[in-house]
Amino acid sequence: MDKLREIIKYLEGRQARFADAREHLFRQREIYTEDTRVEQITEQDISGVGIKVLYNNGWGYASTSAMDMDSLRAAADKALSLAKYADKSAVEPVVLAAEPRHTGRFATNIKENPFEVKISDAVGALLEAGEISLKGKDIIKANGYLVLRNMRKKYANTEGSAIETDIYTILPEIQATARANGEVKSRHYWASPETAGYEFFRGIDFKTNAARIAEQAREHCFARACESGPTTLILDPEHLSLTIHESVGHPTELDRVLGYEESCAGRSFATMDKLGKFKYGSELVNLVADNTLEGGLASCGYDDEGVECQKWHIVKDGILNGYGVNRELAHKMNMSRANGTTRATLYSDVPITRMPNLYLAPGKKPLTKEQLIADTESGIYIEGMGSFSIDQMRLNMQFGGDAFWEIKNGKITGMLKDVVYNALSYEFWRSCDAIADESEFRRAGFITCGKGDPMQAAQMTHGASPARFRNITVRRAK
Amino acid sequence: MNKTNSIIEKVLKDPVTDHVVLAYSKSETHHIRFSNNSVNRENLHKLEEEVKAEVGVDGATGACRTNDLSEEGIKRAVAKAYETAKLLPKDPEYMPPITQQEAAAVKNFKPAFGEFSEEKKYGILDEAFGEMKKAGLNSAGSLSANPYTLEVYNNRGARLSHTNCFSTLALTAMTGNSSFKDSHISKDFSDYDGAKFLSDLVSRAKLSENPGPLEPGKYTVVLGPAAVEELLLFFCWYNMDAKAIDEGRSAFSKRPGATIASDLVHICSKPDHGRVGLHPFCIDDGMPYTEFDMIKGGKLVSPWYSRFYAAKKGVAATGKQSANILFKGTDKPLEALIAGVENGVYVNSFWYIRLVDLMDGIFTGMTRDGVFRIKDGKLAGSVNNFRFNQSVFDLLLNTIDVGRAKDMFFTSMPPITVRDFNFVSKTEF
């Protein structure tokens, strides 16, 4: 931390209006298994310091992997020089929202350090799952995937903040692929990724799920093709996590809304003039951003511009209520404070507005998934994530899924195949007429959310209880 | 020889096992991002140097990447890779490092590029912002320069090195209700004609203004090079692996020997193309990429063979991926393709392409940054964006015209005319 403070002082002496420095150690182990072999194991140990400088109204950023003071000063000079170039084209003043000075530390609550457990333990669990799946009839491929990640950061800025964070992340997945009846279908099991210690991995029941996904992958090959047309959908929490991510999370990043992301990720239909009045969903729909969520993938204590993580509503009782906002853009919404959503992937990446942990609040009335299905005369129940695509304004969206079942007269009657549904995002959320209660709430999340230019991958948790959507256009995929 | 090279050579003089591969990469990126006619986003410089150590032990391999390039740091990465390999079961697809003789087959090339100064970069942007403002347009995009060096060393004497540079200006010009995007891809921008690039961009952006409604359906489309690239890359990634084809997990598995494309379609790879391709050898193990045809004469000629699978099948390895993907063009300009369409749609680029059905090669996605109606061989105004659900096999079979190819980083792609392209819905803009 002393070196970071020194470099901040160095920049203060060179007319930087604001500067921060972030030391960032990124350690990751990825294990890929294919059938009963280890396809690949990759370790990464990447560390360095990123320095961000505001000169007048221009930003510059430079990084170095060397920790000696000469290298840090050289990076600081480069960031300052780039900021001066940017200032020449500035079209408006940069106004940074105030943030209290923080000197805290935040760490994932872990019992067992994943990097201190022998690799063979995780490899063994994935290979065993593969063996079980391959015993299933007509299974031609079994894959396993595990990511263990540790991000350690030190942060200092010209306002006196000095923060340390230490985050552990675990993402496990297995998949089985069946070939039968002229079809090839895969089914996956994804234990919701968490910020957690290795004890989280130990608690996962791979054996039962490996057998289940193998059976369901084969069943999918024999499923009846869906019919095209409007129908009722009941979506499981994992599936809804992706829908929430694409049709609510991204369109409510304020930098997108204001056009800063136009050239890559795109813009948003959820413009600021709609705040507080636009009917984003039915009145049952409450979408809550919460970077204080225990175990949440975006729960990091403080973000990469030194703002404390927070909780707020993105959609409240169906109405657009908020955005993910950084310090630079907060004033455009008359917000006195950013909400702690600015993150970078590696030390060499510029922190940008990233999606928070974002979940669909459970229904308030007692309602189980089984009751929800029993209450549905005709429709399709979808589990898991499949094909997904949405336009750059986040309006026209099309989703598939990992498995589909027909609902007739309140009962699951068999598996379907080739299901994709297509809707405008706000029409989709407006059609939500039931959400199961808290007892059915499940999490899911991502560690590969792409945004920025150069592209960065961020992590965040979503969650939901199963929910029902009426009159959604379903189309046969082929 | 620089310091890192010397350390790598030292580590390889006394290899921990008979399988040690050290891949070194160095890149210096200057990336300037802008929006609202101002440099107001990522404006960064990064110098990245890494070594990836791969160590084999008794038929299993472990790997570790580090950016600690001190002797201790590199040795630590080797030790971690070794420890990982030791704990793993024997891999039935294990391959030893390539030999010096195998490495000698590399089709290397030395691209020439000069300095691309900061003054020049910001000057290019000043000119662009000025032209956009003059035309009443807004702009967003990035200008980046990325010189890099990749080297692969192993304990069997293979030594490979490639230095290259890619620079890009990607610029989206926006009216109040539409956009058009174009890119200039170069080594050092010595070939950049700002006046022409910006004038073409402004005229297309103006043409995109006030998009009119057009119902979805099947249309004859002219796809711009960026659109062709986006769709074909997805198709290749999912379907070109030879092992997946043989195991029944590729759309090609269902089509052995079938006619899958029009005779106009010729897709191949050429490692020493010079302008297209990031490196002429695999950056993990140094395997030299080969020149080969993928699709020609309406048929799949060769998929992608890894070293293991090529050895198993007794064919030449192409690599898990290829050095580049070249869709052979003609000498026809884009305007000639448009002139050949009486009633259709021009698509500049796609967005958010995803697989819908693996075995039938069906993909979905949206049009983006330039969709125009074609009437009587001319662009006739802008229309709303569409979603498509399209079989790439149908696209390849229905390709009725091919234009002049545009060179990009990893691909060279021509505009193409395709019958019966399947737009399934539209959006609100």
Image: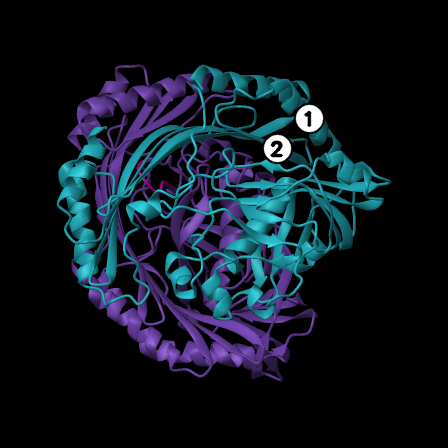
| Vertical position of residue B406 compared to residue B303: above or below | above
- Residue type, label 1: Asp
Contact (CB < 8 A) between labels 2 and 1? yes
Q: Is residue B175 left or right of residue B186?
A: right
Q: Main secondary structure of the magenta part?
A: loop
Q: Which residue is the site of mark 2?
A: B182
Q: Does residue A110 appear anywhere in the picture?
A: no
Q: Is residue B81 left or right of residue A176?
A: left
Residue occupying image coordinates x 68% and y 55%: B395
Give the label on residue B200, or none: 1
> Considering depth in this image, is B339 or B362 the residue closer to the camera?
B339
Residue occupying image coordinates x 64% and y 31%: B174
Indicate yes or no whether the magenta region holds residue A346.
yes
Q: Chain of mark 2?
A: B
Q: Does residue B128 appear anywhere in the picture?
A: yes
**Residue B416, how many percent across, how many down?**
70, 45
Q: Secondary structure at mark 1?
A: helix
> Considering depth in this image, is B50 or B333 the residue closer to the camera?
B333
Q: Label 2 to label 1, Cα distance in Å?
A: 9 Å
On whether disc 2 and disc 1 are found on a single subunit, the reply is yes
- Residue type, label 2: Asp
Q: Is residue A325 left or right of residue B135?
A: left
**Residue A447, how many percent across, how many down?**
38, 53
Q: In the rendered image, what is the letter of the chain coloured purple?
A: A
**Residue A98, how many percent across, how many down?**
36, 31
Chain part drawn in magenta: A343-347
Shade of chain B as shown in the rendered figure? cyan
| Vertical position of residue A353 compared to residue A199: above or below | above
Q: Secondary structure at mark 2?
A: strand
| Vertical position of residue B406 compared to residue B131: above or below | below
Q: Chain of mark 1?
A: B
Mark 2 Cα within 10 Å, few/some/many (few <14, many 20+)? many
